Amino acid sequence: MADTVFRHAKDDPDFVAFQRPARGGWEDVTAAQFAAEVTAVAKGLIASGIEMGDRVAILSGTRYEWVVLDYAIWTAGGCTVAIYETSSPDQAQWILEDSATVLLATETGKHAQNLTAVTDAAEALREVLVIEDGALAELTRRGEAVTDSQLDERRHQVRADSAATLIYTSGTTGKPKGVQLTHANFYAESAACAIAFSDSMYKGRRTLMFLPLAHVFARAISFGAFDSKVTVGHTSDTTTLVEQFAVFKPNFVLSVPRVFEKVYNSAKQKAEDGGKGKIFAKATDTAIEFSKASEKGSVPLGLKLKHALFDKLVYGKLRDALGGECDRAVSGGAALGSRLGHFFSGIGVPVYEGYGLTETSAAVTVNTSGARRIGTVGRPLEGHAAKIAEDGELLVKGPVVFGGYWHNPDATADAIRDGWFHTGDLGSIDEDGFVSITGRKKEIIVTAGGKNVAPAVLEDALRAHPLISQCLVVGDGKPFIGALVTLDEETLPGWKERNGLAADVAFTELVKHADLVAEIDAAIAEANTKVSNAEAIKKYRVLEADFTMETGELTPTLKLKRNIIHQERATEIAAIYS
């Protein structure tokens, strides 16, 4: 994967590969400059004792230095371990220890300080460098004595089947598994993306990357963009995206459904606040109708005229919010939904939805301009295949599929059988080969923001509290994580007595009692310390009746029957998000 760095520098040294924030604007980084930086940092890694196959971790938000380190690690023959900047100390410790990381680069001194106990405990870890304290400059200084021939010798020891990265993905037990992706996996993803998006990813185009680079989705598209000579900018400040879009002017963006939902909801709210709610509602209906008609191949004249009117009144302003030059978007990480898909298509910014997992190096199916069906996740990438197992599970195969979990042969054998990767998702494939995801076979929750959450970590922690009997974490496809909580009938009478409440106090009064609320809030807060902020429970609801075997909500071994609870408690779950 690092070969592209040096190929671009030789063949097209003045190509602007990246733009990085500088003095309130954006500063060009040419292919030649990028190669020089990667070379200098890679030499520093070798001088720091990094050997072939050694794991080097990056814990940082999305920024240009992330990319320099990633390519430098590969150039030095190492393997990048990606860690979310929002990871809890427990999560970071598991990743560092399980991967036997030898060097860690954190974004800020605060990150390093928060992880002091963790890094002290990680036996293989020799050093922590801080990006904002000059980590890249320090590595450059260290590498001054390493020769070009030494670096070339190391770089050319890297093979297609060498490990490029370890990305830890949540398991149902709460212990994340290390997904090992090779250079061949990422190369296949980049090549397939170049074919799928040949009308969008080419020299002269621009994209602003704001999703976490610790997530395989953002990283894979970044590789594809760089390989195809798209100019890439990076930012982790998602609170000022509209202002950044206005300056950077991306031609396409990569995002998760939650961002598209926010764009739509904020525009709708703004219209309603300004007394133009009815106009926006009509514009929305027209955009959706126009998209559906276009998909069928025939748009009536009256609809064309209405669409043209709303394009001037509404749609143009929405496109301006994306910088004015964005003509498409790619969505992944969770389901977008047909309504939003048709809406964005109707306003002139089609969203191409795809599907994939960390284990498939990001996308394994995708909609393209030449083959698109809104509401599906598209067809398999070139050179890949998909089929549905007898139990409805989606199975995939092809060069983007990983070879196995890090030091976990049992999990690997369970995931890859007869050459097919078992995704854990339920799906269907129509007669034209378009794949739809119909449900989730495994327990992992995927929020609207694309965050994978293992419910067991939170549920186990909450069940440990004496007042709490059972807990069901919810949030699949939702903007945040919520929970249904039941009270322990054996503990409750004593608690009531200690707090001066009558034994027969009404449930509606009980759940409003300040002391009860405070105890459950504290239990939730304690459980949330075990996960990142994006995985934390934001709202919960206390149920009047417990889950039992008699109601069919628990198995004989007292495991939650999630589907049954979701059906029986649908009203309470909906109330969390109302």
Image (tube, grey):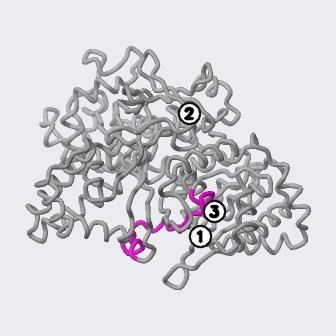
- Whichever of callouts 3 and 1 sits on the residue coming sooner in the sequence is 1
- Marks 3 & 1, CB-CB < 8 Å contact: yes
Q: How far apart in space, not on screen, are marks 3 and 2 (Cα)?
A: 28 Å
SS under mark 2: loop
In the rendered image, residue 131, in percent from the top left (x then y), is placed at 65, 69
SS under mark 1: strand
In the rendered image, residue 81, in percent from the top left (x then y), is placed at 66, 50
The amino acid type found where label 2 is placed reads His
The amino acid type found where label 3 is placed reads Val
Q: Residues within 10 Å of mark 2 (few under 14, many from 20)?
A: some
The residue singled out by tag 2 in the image is: 384
Between 310 and 106, the residue placed more toward the observer is 310
Q: Residue at x 48, y 51 (%)?
A: 532
In the rendered image, residue 453, in percent from the top left (x then y), is placed at 45, 42
Which disc, if any, is residue 200? none
- Marks 3 & 2, CB-CB < 8 Å contact: no
- Marks 1 & 2, CB-CB < 8 Å contact: no
The residue singled out by tag 1 in the image is: 18
In the rendered image, residue 319, in percent from the top left (x then y), is placed at 31, 66
SS under mark 3: helix
Residue 527 visible in the snapshot: no
Q: Residues within 10 Å of mark 3 (few under 14, many from 20)?
A: some
